[in-house]
Amino acid sequence: MTLSTASNFAKPDDAFRAIVEAHRGLSDEQSADLDAALVLVLANHIGDIAVLHEAIALAKRRMLDASQQQQQQQ
Amino acid sequence: MAQTKTQFGYRRHPDQDRAGANLAEHPIVVVGAGPVGLSLAIDLAQRGQSVVLLDDADRIGEGSRAICFSKRSLEFWDRLGIGQRMVDKGVVWSVGKIFHGEQQLYQFNLLPEQGHKRPAFINLQQFYAEAYLVDRVGELPAIDLRWRNKVTGLEPRNDYVLLTIQTPDGPYRLNAQYVVACDGARSSLRQMVGAEFAGQVFEDQFLIADVKMTAAFPTERWFWFDPPFHAGRSALLHKQPDDIWRIDLQLSRHADPAIEKLPENVRPRIARMLGHDKFDFEWISLYKFQCRRMDRFIHGRVIFAGDAAHQVSPFGARGANSGLEDAENIAWKLDRVLRATSPETLIDSYHTERSAAADENIRESTRSTDFMAPVTRQEARLRQAVLSLAKETEFGKRMVNGGRLSVPSVYETPLSTADSDAWRGGPRPGASMLDAPVTGRDGRSSFLTEAFIGQGTRFTLLEFGNGAVADAPEGIGTIRVGGENGFADPQGFAAKRYDAEPGTAYLLRPDGYVAARFRKPSRPAIDAALSRASGLN
């Protein structure tokens, strides 16, 4: 299986909202903790190490893009 | 900068000379001659009702208010006889683009398919819409429009409401069987019935500037997150008629309105956005907004519609459009109740249907606002992640929320008859009818929405036949697609959009919503659905 980046939720706004609301009222520290647990839970649910590696690569590539942009701006 | 676009005269009415036991009595008094009140009055008058329409001012215009009118609103206005005038003046659009920084993230088309009479949206200044509606009111003797008539008192009685009305000649009183309050966000009638108006207050400030310029920008809705000309915030650009462009800029929560709205402070920001400063200001204002609604839209014989009943953020064009949906929803129900063809309880379904729609509009516009102006650091990070993922993933694009634009709600309502047949598509009971191009027997091109108007905007059976069509109960309209005497459906749009097979029938309500649908309709099943949709059981 490969990583799906198609839009899989019938209502993507509901999914985004659910995550945002899970963080409501938490401190930064608590939010980071929640995210860490959430990532592990979802990774286990996917249960496919190749997909997990792809997802990590996509998320990191995005960080790289952002830092390159910042350097260009400076 | 406030411009008075049109001014109307106050005229003394004979009702003002009546007092005591001799007060005038009217079946329907609509309060507030904005787009909602005017449209409601026209709909009621076209159904044969006499309407008194009161407004505390004597002019329309002033300021920058609604600009986006939806396909659904245009279809409603078509029924009122003014859709074409709105479209002729308005700027037609269906494409929106979302940018992040300098980069376009994606574009969407709100009406990608052919074969609809009306576009997804037009942009039109509210004062034009109101002026055209007032012109139409002038053609209908059944509407008695009274300017500078301000309701100052409201006393519920058993069978009527006693209204006290202030005029330049002093106060007078009259009795109304039903009052519909369309008197806006600061509704004084809402205060008179003692209703709360609770909800969420947003701290973010936005600046609206309407600028006049000739420009080569396409007629699309452009929305930016973190644009180069307005770092860290959001911006919106949208075209209106007369070479006017609406610009909406998010400001800091702590911005000082008095300073921010000075033209010398607004001008350089907009010049950077447009890349030139050859423009003039028509309007500048700062606003904050609230999302809130009344608990109950019906208080005895007083019914609330539009901004008086519910307020949303402006992102999504859900204010005026939802108010117009309120008007089309209550008009046919009041008409039937006043004719005694339906019981008074039919009116309760207005609250059921439209308060759920208000909740949906509030939810959607609140989410858009939260996405534009994240409250916490984590929310900002999540948004940043979505925006950056949107560059290369489809799911990221779908999560970017630069405003979800108004579409008609699907009602969960006791007026609907639940499906008992199998359907793969088509509008389900509670959904609004879909348009499609059809050809009349005379070869003339038409649309289903026009055929519905041609049938008198009443309960109508839309049948797809090959001769095998059910006979419609008396008093309801019929539209036949296919078969010997029916409209032709040359491109198959109608059959496809209604998932139609030979014999398929949809029962449409007088507001164009689907009440029931059948694969093989029988007369008893149609009668039962009609009865239910009329509030008779």
Image (cartoon, coloured by chain):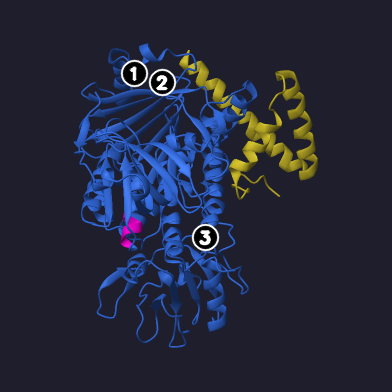
Q: Which residue is located at x 25 percent, y 74 percent?
A: B444
Secondary structure beneath disc 3?
A: helix
User: For the residues tagged 3 and 1, is the chain the same?
Assistant: yes
Disc number for residue B357: none
Callout in the foreground (2, 3): 3
Secondary structure beneath disc 2?
A: loop
User: For the residues tagged 2 and 1, is the chain the same?
Assistant: yes
Contact, mark 2 vs mark 1 (Cβ under 8 Å): yes
Query: What segment carries the magenta color?
Result: B42-46
What's the amino acid at mark 1?
A: Arg
Q: Relative to B256, is B88 above or below?
A: below
Q: Which residue was labeled with disc 1?
A: B269
Q: Which residue was labeled with disc 2?
A: B230
Question: Is residue B83 located in the magenta-colored stretch of the structure?
Answer: no
Q: Which residue was labeled with disc 3?
A: B344
| Chain that appears blue | B
